[in-house]
Image (cartoon, coloured by chain):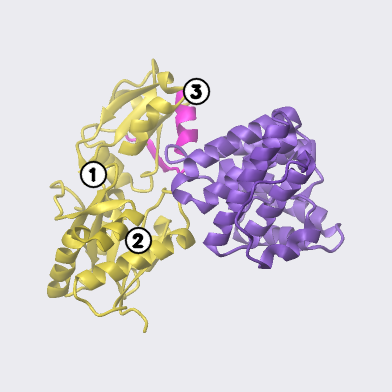
Amino acid sequence: MAALATLVFCAPGYPGGAGDAQPFVDQFAKAAAASAGWKADSLGAVYDPTEQGGLAKLAEKDSVLAFLPYAFYVQHAAALHLAPLAQADVAGVGTQERWTLVGKAGGPVTGPASMTGYTILSVAGYAPEFVKHSALAEWALPADVKIEATGQILSALRRVASGEPVLALLDQTQAAALVTLPFAAQIKTLTQSAALPVALIAVVDSRLPDPRAKAFQAALVKLNSTSDGAATLASLKLKGFVLPQLPGNAGKP
Amino acid sequence: MKLNVGVAVAALTLAGCKTPPPPIAPPSSMTVEQLAAAVALDARRSDLETDSKIRDQLAADALQNAQACLERAPQAAACLYYDGIALGLKARAHPLQANEALKSMLDALGGAEAADPAYDQAGPARVKALVLIKAPAWPLGPGDAEAGLAAARRAAALRPDHPPNVLALAEALAKTGDVHGAQESYRRARDLIQALPSSRDRDDWLHEADQALGKLPAAH
Protein backbone atom coordinates (compact mmCIF):
# COMPACT_ATOMS: atom_id res chain seq x y z
CA MET A 1 0.00 0.00 0.00
CA ALA A 2 1.34 3.46 -0.87
CA ALA A 3 2.05 5.76 2.06
CA LEU A 4 -0.70 8.28 2.74
CA ALA A 5 1.66 10.95 3.98
CA THR A 6 5.30 11.81 3.46
CA LEU A 7 8.07 13.02 5.74
CA VAL A 8 10.58 15.02 3.68
CA PHE A 9 14.20 15.00 4.83
CA CYS A 10 16.24 17.83 3.38
CA ALA A 11 19.83 18.66 4.33
CA PRO A 12 21.49 20.97 1.80
CA GLY A 13 25.27 21.11 1.93
CA TYR A 14 25.78 17.90 3.82
CA PRO A 15 27.20 14.73 2.26
CA GLY A 16 25.16 11.80 1.05
CA GLY A 17 23.05 11.24 -2.00
CA ALA A 18 19.36 10.46 -1.99
CA GLY A 19 20.01 6.78 -2.67
CA ASP A 20 22.46 6.47 0.23
CA ALA A 21 20.05 7.90 2.77
CA GLN A 22 16.74 6.46 1.56
CA PRO A 23 16.84 3.13 3.46
CA PHE A 24 17.55 4.96 6.71
CA VAL A 25 14.79 7.54 6.32
CA ASP A 26 12.37 4.75 5.32
CA GLN A 27 13.24 2.92 8.52
CA PHE A 28 12.83 6.09 10.56
CA ALA A 29 9.38 6.86 9.12
CA LYS A 30 8.23 3.33 9.81
CA ALA A 31 9.49 3.39 13.40
CA ALA A 32 8.08 6.85 14.16
CA ALA A 33 4.69 6.02 12.66
CA ALA A 34 4.51 2.80 14.66
CA SER A 35 5.47 4.66 17.82
CA ALA A 36 2.66 7.15 17.15
CA GLY A 37 0.15 4.35 16.78
CA TRP A 38 -0.39 5.08 13.11
CA LYS A 39 -1.25 2.37 10.63
CA ALA A 40 1.67 0.54 9.09
CA ASP A 41 2.77 2.19 5.84
CA SER A 42 0.74 5.33 6.57
CA LEU A 43 3.92 7.42 6.58
CA GLY A 44 6.57 7.33 3.89
CA ALA A 45 9.82 9.25 3.76
CA VAL A 46 11.93 10.82 1.08
CA TYR A 47 15.40 12.39 1.26
CA ASP A 48 16.66 15.22 -0.88
CA PRO A 49 20.14 16.68 -0.40
CA THR A 50 19.41 19.92 -2.27
CA GLU A 51 17.49 23.02 -1.29
CA GLN A 52 15.56 23.24 -4.55
CA GLY A 53 14.78 19.53 -4.57
CA GLY A 54 13.60 19.72 -0.98
CA LEU A 55 11.40 22.72 -1.71
CA ALA A 56 9.85 20.95 -4.68
CA LYS A 57 9.04 17.92 -2.56
CA LEU A 58 7.64 20.06 0.26
CA ALA A 59 5.29 21.72 -2.24
CA GLU A 60 3.56 18.39 -2.85
CA LYS A 61 0.30 17.98 -0.94
CA ASP A 62 1.22 14.66 0.62
CA SER A 63 4.33 16.21 2.24
CA VAL A 64 2.92 16.69 5.71
CA LEU A 65 6.13 16.64 7.75
CA ALA A 66 9.67 17.90 7.21
CA PHE A 67 13.00 17.09 8.86
CA LEU A 68 15.19 20.13 8.31
CA PRO A 69 18.38 21.81 9.47
CA TYR A 70 17.55 24.91 11.48
CA ALA A 71 19.04 27.11 8.73
CA PHE A 72 16.53 25.74 6.22
CA TYR A 73 13.74 26.28 8.73
CA VAL A 74 14.67 29.94 9.28
CA GLN A 75 14.94 30.56 5.55
CA HIS A 76 11.65 28.96 4.56
CA ALA A 77 9.43 28.66 7.65
CA ALA A 78 7.24 31.62 6.80
CA ALA A 79 6.71 30.76 3.15
CA LEU A 80 6.08 27.08 3.81
CA HIS A 81 4.06 27.62 6.99
CA LEU A 82 6.27 25.31 9.01
CA ALA A 83 5.17 24.54 12.57
CA PRO A 84 7.93 22.96 14.70
CA LEU A 85 7.02 19.67 16.36
CA ALA A 86 10.30 18.48 17.81
CA GLN A 87 13.95 19.42 18.00
CA ALA A 88 16.55 16.82 17.07
CA ASP A 89 19.25 15.71 19.49
CA VAL A 90 22.11 15.03 17.09
CA ALA A 91 24.84 12.58 18.12
CA GLY A 92 28.05 14.40 18.91
CA VAL A 93 26.39 17.82 18.71
CA GLY A 94 23.28 17.93 20.91
CA THR A 95 20.01 19.79 20.54
CA GLN A 96 21.73 23.12 19.96
CA GLU A 97 24.92 24.30 18.31
CA ARG A 98 26.89 27.48 17.91
CA TRP A 99 28.03 28.71 14.50
CA THR A 100 31.49 30.23 14.20
CA LEU A 101 32.67 32.87 11.75
CA VAL A 102 36.37 32.51 10.94
CA GLY A 103 38.79 34.64 8.97
CA LYS A 104 42.50 34.82 8.26
CA ALA A 105 44.66 35.16 11.35
CA GLY A 106 46.26 38.57 11.24
CA GLY A 107 43.95 39.56 8.39
CA PRO A 108 42.11 42.84 8.05
CA VAL A 109 38.71 41.65 9.28
CA THR A 110 38.24 42.41 12.94
CA GLY A 111 34.55 43.28 13.02
CA PRO A 112 31.50 43.71 10.82
CA ALA A 113 32.62 47.08 9.49
CA SER A 114 35.81 45.61 8.01
CA MET A 115 33.92 42.92 6.09
CA THR A 116 33.11 45.23 3.19
CA GLY A 117 33.70 43.40 -0.08
CA TYR A 118 33.98 40.00 1.60
CA THR A 119 32.06 36.81 0.86
CA ILE A 120 30.85 34.47 3.57
CA LEU A 121 31.06 30.80 2.56
CA SER A 122 29.10 28.20 4.49
CA VAL A 123 27.12 24.99 4.18
CA ALA A 124 24.27 27.21 5.38
CA GLY A 125 24.95 29.80 2.67
CA TYR A 126 21.75 28.77 0.90
CA ALA A 127 19.91 30.37 3.82
CA PRO A 128 21.00 34.03 3.95
CA GLU A 129 18.23 34.88 6.40
CA PHE A 130 19.70 32.37 8.82
CA VAL A 131 23.24 33.68 8.27
CA LYS A 132 22.28 37.33 8.74
CA HIS A 133 19.64 37.13 11.44
CA SER A 134 20.49 33.98 13.41
CA ALA A 135 24.13 32.91 13.08
CA LEU A 136 25.43 36.49 12.80
CA ALA A 137 22.55 38.24 14.55
CA GLU A 138 24.94 40.29 16.65
CA TRP A 139 26.93 41.50 13.62
CA ALA A 140 25.39 44.15 11.38
CA LEU A 141 26.81 43.03 8.05
CA PRO A 142 27.75 45.66 5.47
CA ALA A 143 25.32 45.73 2.55
CA ASP A 144 27.86 44.44 0.03
CA VAL A 145 28.79 41.28 1.91
CA LYS A 146 27.93 38.24 -0.21
CA ILE A 147 26.71 34.97 1.24
CA GLU A 148 27.36 31.80 -0.76
CA ALA A 149 26.62 28.13 -0.19
CA THR A 150 29.43 25.61 -0.39
CA GLY A 151 29.64 21.90 0.20
CA GLN A 152 33.44 22.18 0.04
CA ILE A 153 34.20 23.77 3.38
CA LEU A 154 37.81 22.59 3.34
CA SER A 155 38.37 24.50 0.10
CA ALA A 156 36.68 27.51 1.66
CA LEU A 157 39.03 27.38 4.64
CA ARG A 158 42.05 27.16 2.34
CA ARG A 159 40.83 30.31 0.62
CA VAL A 160 40.44 32.00 3.99
CA ALA A 161 43.96 30.99 5.03
CA SER A 162 45.46 32.17 1.75
CA GLY A 163 44.12 35.66 2.33
CA GLU A 164 41.34 35.78 -0.26
CA PRO A 165 38.51 38.14 0.69
CA VAL A 166 36.37 35.34 2.05
CA LEU A 167 35.23 34.25 5.51
CA ALA A 168 33.84 30.87 6.50
CA LEU A 169 30.84 30.30 8.72
CA LEU A 170 31.26 26.90 10.35
CA ASP A 171 28.82 24.63 12.12
CA GLN A 172 29.83 23.24 15.49
CA THR A 173 31.36 20.04 14.11
CA GLN A 174 33.46 21.95 11.61
CA ALA A 175 34.58 24.52 14.16
CA ALA A 176 35.60 21.81 16.62
CA ALA A 177 37.69 20.11 13.94
CA LEU A 178 39.58 23.27 12.92
CA VAL A 179 42.55 22.29 15.08
CA THR A 180 43.07 19.17 12.94
CA LEU A 181 43.93 21.24 9.88
CA PRO A 182 47.60 21.72 9.05
CA PHE A 183 46.92 25.41 8.44
CA ALA A 184 44.84 25.93 11.60
CA ALA A 185 47.24 28.60 12.86
CA GLN A 186 46.31 30.76 9.88
CA ILE A 187 42.64 30.80 10.86
CA LYS A 188 41.09 32.90 13.62
CA THR A 189 37.64 32.99 15.16
CA LEU A 190 35.85 36.28 14.59
CA THR A 191 32.56 35.65 16.34
CA GLN A 192 30.27 32.91 17.49
CA SER A 193 26.50 32.66 17.48
CA ALA A 194 24.24 32.02 20.42
CA ALA A 195 23.21 28.40 20.84
CA LEU A 196 20.75 27.59 18.07
CA PRO A 197 18.71 24.49 17.27
CA VAL A 198 20.49 21.98 15.03
CA ALA A 199 17.52 20.43 13.23
CA LEU A 200 13.77 20.21 13.54
CA ILE A 201 10.80 18.17 12.53
CA ALA A 202 7.94 20.45 11.51
CA VAL A 203 4.41 20.15 10.22
CA VAL A 204 4.10 21.59 6.72
CA ASP A 205 1.30 24.04 6.01
CA SER A 206 -1.10 22.56 8.59
CA ARG A 207 -1.37 19.42 6.46
CA LEU A 208 -1.39 17.21 9.53
CA PRO A 209 -4.46 17.53 11.79
CA ASP A 210 -3.64 18.66 15.32
CA PRO A 211 -4.44 15.36 17.08
CA ARG A 212 -2.20 13.43 14.69
CA ALA A 213 0.52 16.04 15.05
CA LYS A 214 0.36 15.77 18.84
CA ALA A 215 0.53 11.98 18.65
CA PHE A 216 3.52 12.17 16.33
CA GLN A 217 5.26 14.69 18.58
CA ALA A 218 4.82 12.43 21.61
CA ALA A 219 6.09 9.49 19.57
CA LEU A 220 9.23 11.36 18.54
CA VAL A 221 10.06 12.35 22.11
CA LYS A 222 9.76 8.77 23.36
CA LEU A 223 11.33 7.12 20.31
CA ASN A 224 14.70 6.61 22.01
CA SER A 225 13.13 4.82 24.97
CA THR A 226 13.21 1.45 23.18
CA SER A 227 16.30 -0.29 21.87
CA ASP A 228 14.82 -0.59 18.38
CA GLY A 229 13.91 3.09 18.34
CA ALA A 230 17.35 4.08 19.58
CA ALA A 231 18.98 1.95 16.88
CA THR A 232 16.82 3.54 14.19
CA LEU A 233 17.77 6.99 15.46
CA ALA A 234 21.45 6.05 15.61
CA SER A 235 21.42 5.09 11.94
CA LEU A 236 20.59 8.75 11.24
CA LYS A 237 23.17 9.95 13.78
CA LEU A 238 20.39 11.01 16.13
CA LYS A 239 20.03 10.42 19.85
CA GLY A 240 16.41 11.47 20.13
CA PHE A 241 14.04 14.43 20.09
CA VAL A 242 12.98 17.08 22.58
CA LEU A 243 10.15 19.58 22.45
CA PRO A 244 11.14 22.59 20.35
CA GLN A 245 12.73 25.57 22.06
CA LEU A 246 13.28 28.11 19.33
CA PRO A 247 14.77 31.58 19.59
CA GLY A 248 12.11 34.28 19.56
CA ASN A 249 12.71 35.50 16.02
CA ALA A 250 12.94 32.08 14.37
CA GLY A 251 11.08 31.72 11.13
CA LYS A 252 9.48 35.15 11.22
CA PRO A 253 9.00 36.76 7.81
CA MET B 1 32.39 3.13 -4.00
CA LYS B 2 33.54 1.74 -7.34
CA LEU B 3 37.28 1.59 -7.53
CA ASN B 4 37.74 0.88 -11.22
CA VAL B 5 40.80 -1.16 -10.45
CA GLY B 6 41.43 -1.61 -14.13
CA VAL B 7 43.48 -4.74 -13.88
CA ALA B 8 43.39 -7.35 -16.63
CA VAL B 9 41.50 -10.06 -14.82
CA ALA B 10 38.63 -10.37 -17.27
CA ALA B 11 39.18 -14.09 -17.63
CA LEU B 12 38.49 -14.54 -13.94
CA THR B 13 35.33 -12.47 -13.58
CA LEU B 14 33.01 -15.39 -14.24
CA ALA B 15 33.80 -16.47 -10.72
CA GLY B 16 31.82 -13.42 -9.52
CA CYS B 17 28.60 -15.43 -9.20
CA LYS B 18 29.88 -17.92 -6.68
CA THR B 19 30.20 -17.55 -2.93
CA PRO B 20 33.86 -17.38 -2.03
CA PRO B 21 35.18 -19.74 0.63
CA PRO B 22 36.23 -18.23 3.96
CA PRO B 23 39.66 -16.64 3.59
CA ILE B 24 42.60 -18.88 4.19
CA ALA B 25 46.21 -17.83 4.35
CA PRO B 26 47.70 -17.76 0.86
CA PRO B 27 50.33 -20.46 0.24
CA SER B 28 53.90 -19.35 0.68
CA SER B 29 54.60 -20.33 -2.92
CA MET B 30 52.48 -17.43 -4.23
CA THR B 31 54.53 -14.68 -5.81
CA VAL B 32 54.02 -10.94 -5.44
CA GLU B 33 52.37 -10.87 -8.87
CA GLN B 34 50.00 -13.72 -7.99
CA LEU B 35 49.05 -12.10 -4.69
CA ALA B 36 48.42 -8.77 -6.42
CA ALA B 37 46.26 -10.52 -9.01
CA ALA B 38 44.32 -12.26 -6.22
CA VAL B 39 43.48 -8.89 -4.61
CA ALA B 40 42.52 -7.51 -8.02
CA LEU B 41 40.16 -10.45 -8.48
CA ASP B 42 38.60 -9.88 -5.05
CA ALA B 43 38.09 -6.21 -5.96
CA ARG B 44 36.51 -7.04 -9.28
CA ARG B 45 34.16 -9.55 -7.69
CA SER B 46 33.28 -7.12 -4.92
CA ASP B 47 32.34 -4.47 -7.51
CA LEU B 48 29.76 -6.89 -8.90
CA GLU B 49 28.56 -8.28 -5.59
CA THR B 50 25.40 -7.12 -3.82
CA ASP B 51 25.48 -9.49 -0.83
CA SER B 52 27.16 -7.70 2.07
CA LYS B 53 28.36 -10.96 3.66
CA ILE B 54 30.14 -12.00 0.50
CA ARG B 55 31.68 -8.55 0.17
CA ASP B 56 32.88 -8.89 3.74
CA GLN B 57 34.54 -12.22 2.88
CA LEU B 58 36.10 -10.76 -0.24
CA ALA B 59 37.50 -7.86 1.78
CA ALA B 60 38.98 -10.24 4.35
CA ASP B 61 40.53 -12.36 1.60
CA ALA B 62 41.95 -9.30 -0.13
CA LEU B 63 43.45 -7.99 3.10
CA GLN B 64 45.10 -11.33 3.77
CA ASN B 65 46.58 -11.48 0.26
CA ALA B 66 47.76 -7.88 0.47
CA GLN B 67 49.39 -8.53 3.83
CA ALA B 68 51.17 -11.59 2.43
CA CYS B 69 52.33 -9.50 -0.51
CA LEU B 70 53.71 -6.80 1.79
CA GLU B 71 55.54 -9.44 3.84
CA ARG B 72 57.33 -10.57 0.67
CA ALA B 73 58.04 -7.13 -0.77
CA PRO B 74 57.21 -4.26 1.62
CA GLN B 75 58.29 -1.52 -0.79
CA ALA B 76 56.88 -2.99 -4.01
CA ALA B 77 54.38 -0.74 -5.77
CA ALA B 78 52.18 -3.74 -6.50
CA CYS B 79 51.90 -4.70 -2.82
CA LEU B 80 51.33 -1.14 -1.61
CA TYR B 81 48.79 -0.50 -4.36
CA TYR B 82 46.81 -3.64 -3.67
CA ASP B 83 47.03 -3.09 0.06
CA GLY B 84 45.27 0.20 -0.70
CA ILE B 85 42.67 -1.60 -2.81
CA ALA B 86 42.09 -4.19 -0.07
CA LEU B 87 41.62 -1.43 2.50
CA GLY B 88 39.05 0.12 0.18
CA LEU B 89 37.14 -3.16 0.18
CA LYS B 90 37.31 -3.16 3.96
CA ALA B 91 35.92 0.38 4.08
CA ARG B 92 33.00 -0.67 1.90
CA ALA B 93 32.31 -3.82 3.90
CA HIS B 94 32.54 -2.09 7.28
CA PRO B 95 31.07 1.41 6.96
CA LEU B 96 31.52 2.16 10.67
CA GLN B 97 35.30 1.70 10.28
CA ALA B 98 35.39 3.30 6.85
CA ASN B 99 37.16 6.51 7.82
CA GLU B 100 40.16 4.76 9.36
CA ALA B 101 40.34 2.29 6.49
CA LEU B 102 40.15 5.08 3.91
CA LYS B 103 42.92 7.02 5.61
CA SER B 104 45.12 3.91 5.60
CA MET B 105 44.13 3.33 1.98
CA LEU B 106 45.31 6.82 1.03
CA ASP B 107 48.62 6.23 2.85
CA ALA B 108 49.15 2.94 1.00
CA LEU B 109 48.33 4.51 -2.36
CA GLY B 110 50.72 7.36 -1.60
CA GLY B 111 53.44 4.79 -0.98
CA ALA B 112 52.60 3.00 -4.21
CA GLU B 113 52.70 6.23 -6.16
CA ALA B 114 56.10 7.08 -4.71
CA ALA B 115 57.41 3.59 -5.61
CA ASP B 116 56.05 3.47 -9.16
CA PRO B 117 53.60 6.15 -10.30
CA ALA B 118 52.97 4.35 -13.61
CA TYR B 119 51.88 1.09 -12.00
CA ASP B 120 48.51 -0.13 -13.36
CA GLN B 121 48.27 2.75 -15.85
CA ALA B 122 48.91 5.39 -13.14
CA GLY B 123 46.62 3.46 -10.81
CA PRO B 124 47.90 4.84 -7.50
CA ALA B 125 47.10 8.45 -8.39
CA ARG B 126 43.85 7.50 -10.14
CA VAL B 127 42.46 5.45 -7.26
CA LYS B 128 43.67 8.07 -4.78
CA ALA B 129 41.78 10.70 -6.76
CA LEU B 130 38.58 8.67 -6.68
CA VAL B 131 38.83 8.12 -2.93
CA LEU B 132 39.49 11.81 -2.28
CA ILE B 133 36.54 12.99 -4.38
CA LYS B 134 34.04 10.34 -3.22
CA ALA B 135 34.83 9.99 0.49
CA PRO B 136 32.99 12.19 2.99
CA ALA B 137 34.83 15.50 3.17
CA TRP B 138 36.48 17.12 6.16
CA PRO B 139 35.65 17.05 9.00
CA LEU B 140 33.57 13.89 8.57
CA GLY B 141 36.12 11.94 6.53
CA PRO B 142 39.29 12.10 4.42
CA GLY B 143 37.56 13.45 1.31
CA ASP B 144 39.30 16.45 -0.25
CA ALA B 145 38.06 17.45 -3.69
CA GLU B 146 41.02 19.73 -4.47
CA ALA B 147 43.58 17.08 -3.54
CA GLY B 148 41.51 14.62 -5.57
CA LEU B 149 41.69 16.88 -8.59
CA ALA B 150 45.46 17.18 -8.21
CA ALA B 151 45.79 13.39 -8.05
CA ALA B 152 43.52 12.94 -11.07
CA ARG B 153 45.62 15.43 -13.02
CA ARG B 154 48.76 13.45 -12.17
CA ALA B 155 47.19 10.20 -13.39
CA ALA B 156 45.88 11.79 -16.57
CA ALA B 157 49.23 13.43 -17.27
CA LEU B 158 51.09 10.17 -16.83
CA ARG B 159 48.75 7.95 -18.87
CA PRO B 160 46.54 10.34 -20.84
CA ASP B 161 45.09 7.68 -23.12
CA HIS B 162 43.85 5.33 -20.41
CA PRO B 163 40.09 6.03 -20.22
CA PRO B 164 39.69 5.51 -16.43
CA ASN B 165 42.27 8.26 -15.86
CA VAL B 166 40.30 10.67 -18.04
CA LEU B 167 37.04 9.64 -16.37
CA ALA B 168 38.57 10.25 -12.94
CA LEU B 169 39.78 13.68 -14.07
CA ALA B 170 36.32 14.50 -15.39
CA GLU B 171 34.70 13.47 -12.12
CA ALA B 172 37.19 15.54 -10.12
CA LEU B 173 36.58 18.57 -12.32
CA ALA B 174 32.83 18.19 -11.88
CA LYS B 175 33.22 17.86 -8.11
CA THR B 176 35.28 21.05 -7.93
CA GLY B 177 32.77 23.00 -10.01
CA ASP B 178 34.51 23.08 -13.40
CA VAL B 179 31.53 21.95 -15.46
CA HIS B 180 33.09 22.92 -18.78
CA GLY B 181 36.32 21.08 -17.99
CA ALA B 182 34.36 18.05 -16.84
CA GLN B 183 32.34 17.97 -20.06
CA GLU B 184 35.50 18.20 -22.15
CA SER B 185 37.11 15.38 -20.22
CA TYR B 186 34.06 13.14 -20.42
CA ARG B 187 33.90 13.72 -24.18
CA ARG B 188 37.59 12.94 -24.52
CA ALA B 189 37.06 9.78 -22.47
CA ARG B 190 34.20 8.78 -24.79
CA ASP B 191 36.45 9.21 -27.81
CA LEU B 192 39.14 7.06 -26.22
CA ILE B 193 36.66 4.40 -25.13
CA GLN B 194 34.96 4.19 -28.53
CA ALA B 195 38.30 3.49 -30.14
CA LEU B 196 38.74 0.37 -27.97
CA PRO B 197 37.71 -3.15 -28.99
CA SER B 198 34.49 -4.48 -27.48
CA SER B 199 34.81 -5.59 -23.84
CA ARG B 200 32.99 -5.40 -20.55
CA ASP B 201 35.31 -2.61 -19.38
CA ARG B 202 34.58 -0.67 -22.55
CA ASP B 203 30.84 -0.94 -21.94
CA ASP B 204 31.16 0.06 -18.28
CA TRP B 205 33.35 3.07 -19.03
CA LEU B 206 31.10 4.24 -21.84
CA HIS B 207 28.05 3.93 -19.61
CA GLU B 208 29.83 5.91 -16.88
CA ALA B 209 30.79 8.70 -19.31
CA ASP B 210 27.33 8.93 -20.86
CA GLN B 211 25.56 8.90 -17.52
CA ALA B 212 27.84 11.58 -16.08
CA LEU B 213 27.52 13.79 -19.16
CA GLY B 214 23.75 13.55 -18.89
CA LYS B 215 23.81 14.68 -15.28
CA LEU B 216 26.11 17.67 -15.76
CA PRO B 217 24.38 21.04 -15.94
CA ALA B 218 24.83 23.02 -19.14
CA ALA B 219 28.15 24.92 -19.11
CA HIS B 220 28.04 28.62 -19.91
Using the image, determine if residue A145 lies above or below residue A29: above
The magenta segment: A143-161
Instruction: In the picture, one chain is yellow; tell me its letter.
Output: A
In front: mark 1 or mark 3? 1
The three-letter code of the residue at mark 3 reads Ser
Are the residues under badges 1 and 3 in a single subunit? Answer: yes
Task: Choose top left, top right, bottom left or bottom right for residue B104.
Answer: top right
The three-letter code of the residue at mark 1 reads Gly
| Residue B176 in view (yes/no) | no
Q: Which residue is mark 1?
A: A94
Q: CA distance from mark 1 to mark 2?
A: 19 Å
In front: mark 2 or mark 3? 2
Residue B52: percent from left, percent from top:
53, 61
Residue B81: percent from left, percent from top:
69, 38
Q: Residues within 10 Å of mark 3 (few under 14, many from 20)?
A: some
**Helix, strand or loop under label 1:** loop
Q: Which residue is mark 3?
A: A162
**Residue toward you, B32 or A51:** B32
